[in-house]
Image: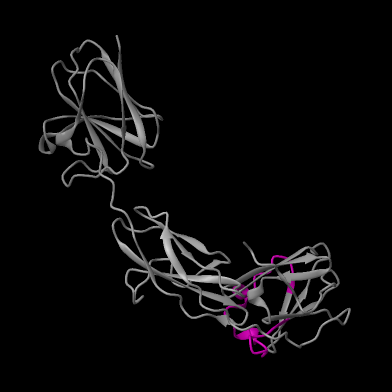
């Protein structure tokens, strides 16, 4: 749930009159010298076709085209927000309260008096994780009164000396849960949260741990020696490359599963088909990796192999990951 927006202390009614002066102030009310922000072109991203001039006393002067009167989007360093015009007032997220002033030079509305800052919120309480899976879980915490948002840390240790990529002081917004993804199987992770508002950031919450589940087993025909036997001059079988692995000495390529087939006719052209483009396949002769001989690779989309089989010759079909892993149907048939 998003908190209700706060009105700016000054109404800006002249954005199509221009110029408009933005007064940037820190939390103590001191002007921010924008010339020292690096670089100005990246610190202020104004998508209004505005003409920008900057002075060193914390003011940025904008001359706006008359057609741009509905939205102003500004990004300063890591801050990014939207002011929306609502009944001739501009509103902004609570965590920016006291950080910015707008002065309309045409109407004279505006002062340099900043509103008092609220006290920082109390630390939230981290709750037990939910939706625990092999590569992810959901971190949960209680709502802290007065919070405008929350920041989440996830680590491999309870002392937080290392962090999971993307989850160090991650601003997750005004929510009380967040999905933590990109994790390893069967691994214990630790998380904590902090609440923030315009007045500052709370202390850390308590630390909670979550252990991801073990990796599911690979398919039964994951290895060459365990190739699934198929037979007859035509038929079909369902399979998957999900959780498949790649043996150290198997042919180059991605994770795969194997099938073994001995056609009982050699006076026909045989076809192998996969019903999707997620996987690919290669046809071999040979009894082990040391003497494999590639007969053909799949072509077209969905993949197809056509070949003239040799009587009483055993073929191995390798179905492997292409654009992704997934279930498939392998079918075989013939043309006389």
Displayed quadrant of residue 196:
bottom right
Q: Is residue 44 magenta?
A: yes
What segment is highlighted magenta in the picture?
A: 23-51
Kindly identify the residue that appears in the image at 27 percent across and 17 percent down.
270
Q: What is the basis of the colouring in this image?
A: one colour
State which quadrant residue 43 falls in.
Answer: bottom right
| Rendering coords of residue 292 (x, y %) | 15, 34
> Looking at the image, is 21 positioned above or below residue 183?
below
Question: Which quadrant, please, contains the N terminus?
Answer: bottom right
Is 45 on the left-hand or right-hand side of 204? right
User: Who's the residue at 50% across and 71% down the image?
Assistant: 151
Image coordinates of residue 42 in percent, x first then y, are: 59, 73
Residue 57 place in picture, x, y as percent: 70, 89
Please state which of residues 286 and 130 is positioned toward the viewer in this rendering: 130
Is 243 situated left or right of 146 in this image?
Answer: left
Picture coordinates of residue 147 (x, y %)? 59, 74
Main structural element of the magenta stretch: helix, strand or loop? loop
Q: Nearer the viewer, residue 31 or 294?
A: 31
């Amino acid at each position: 749930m998003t908190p209700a927006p706060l009105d700016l202390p000054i109404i800006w009614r002249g954005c199509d009159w221009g110029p408009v002066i933005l007064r940037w102030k820190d939390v103590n009310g001191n002007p921010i010298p924008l010339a020292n922000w690096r670089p100005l072109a990246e610190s202020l991203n104004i998508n209004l076709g505005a003409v920008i001039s900057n002075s060193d006393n914390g003011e940025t002067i904008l001359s706006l085209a008359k057609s741009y009167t509905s939205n102003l989007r500004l990004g300063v360093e890591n801050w990014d927000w939207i002011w929306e015009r609502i009944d001739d007032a501009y509103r902004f997220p609570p965590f920016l309260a006291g950080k910015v002033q707008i002065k309309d030079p045409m109407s004279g509305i505006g002062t340099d008096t900043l509103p008092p800052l609220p006290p920082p919120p109390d630390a939230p309480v981290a709750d037990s994780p939910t939706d625990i899976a092999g590569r992810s879980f959901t971190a949960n915490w209680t709502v802290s009164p007065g919070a405008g948002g929350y920041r989440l840390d996830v680590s491999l240790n309870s002392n937080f000396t290392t962090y999971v990529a993307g989850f160090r002081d991650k601003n997750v917004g005004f929510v009380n849960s967040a999905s933590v993804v990109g994790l390893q199987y069967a691994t214990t992770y630790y998380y904590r949260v902090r609440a923030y508002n315009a007045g500052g950031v709370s202390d850390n919450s308590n630390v909670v741990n979550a252990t991801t589940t073990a990796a599911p087993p690979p398919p039964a025909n994951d290895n060459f020696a365990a190739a699934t036997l198929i037979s007859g001059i035509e038929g079909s079988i369902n399979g998957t490359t999900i959780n498949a692995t790649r043996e150290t000495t198997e042919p180059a390529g991605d994770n795969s599963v194997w099938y073994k087939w001995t056609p009982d006719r050699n006076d026909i052209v045989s076809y192998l088909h996969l019903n999707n483009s997620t996987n690919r396949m290669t046809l071999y002769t040979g009894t082990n990796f040391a003497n494999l001989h590639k007969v053909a690779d799949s072509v077209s989309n969905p993949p197809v192999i056509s070949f003239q089989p040799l009587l009483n010759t055993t073929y191995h079909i390798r179905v492997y990951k292409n654009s992704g892993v997934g279930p498939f149907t392998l079918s075989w048939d013939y043309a006389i």
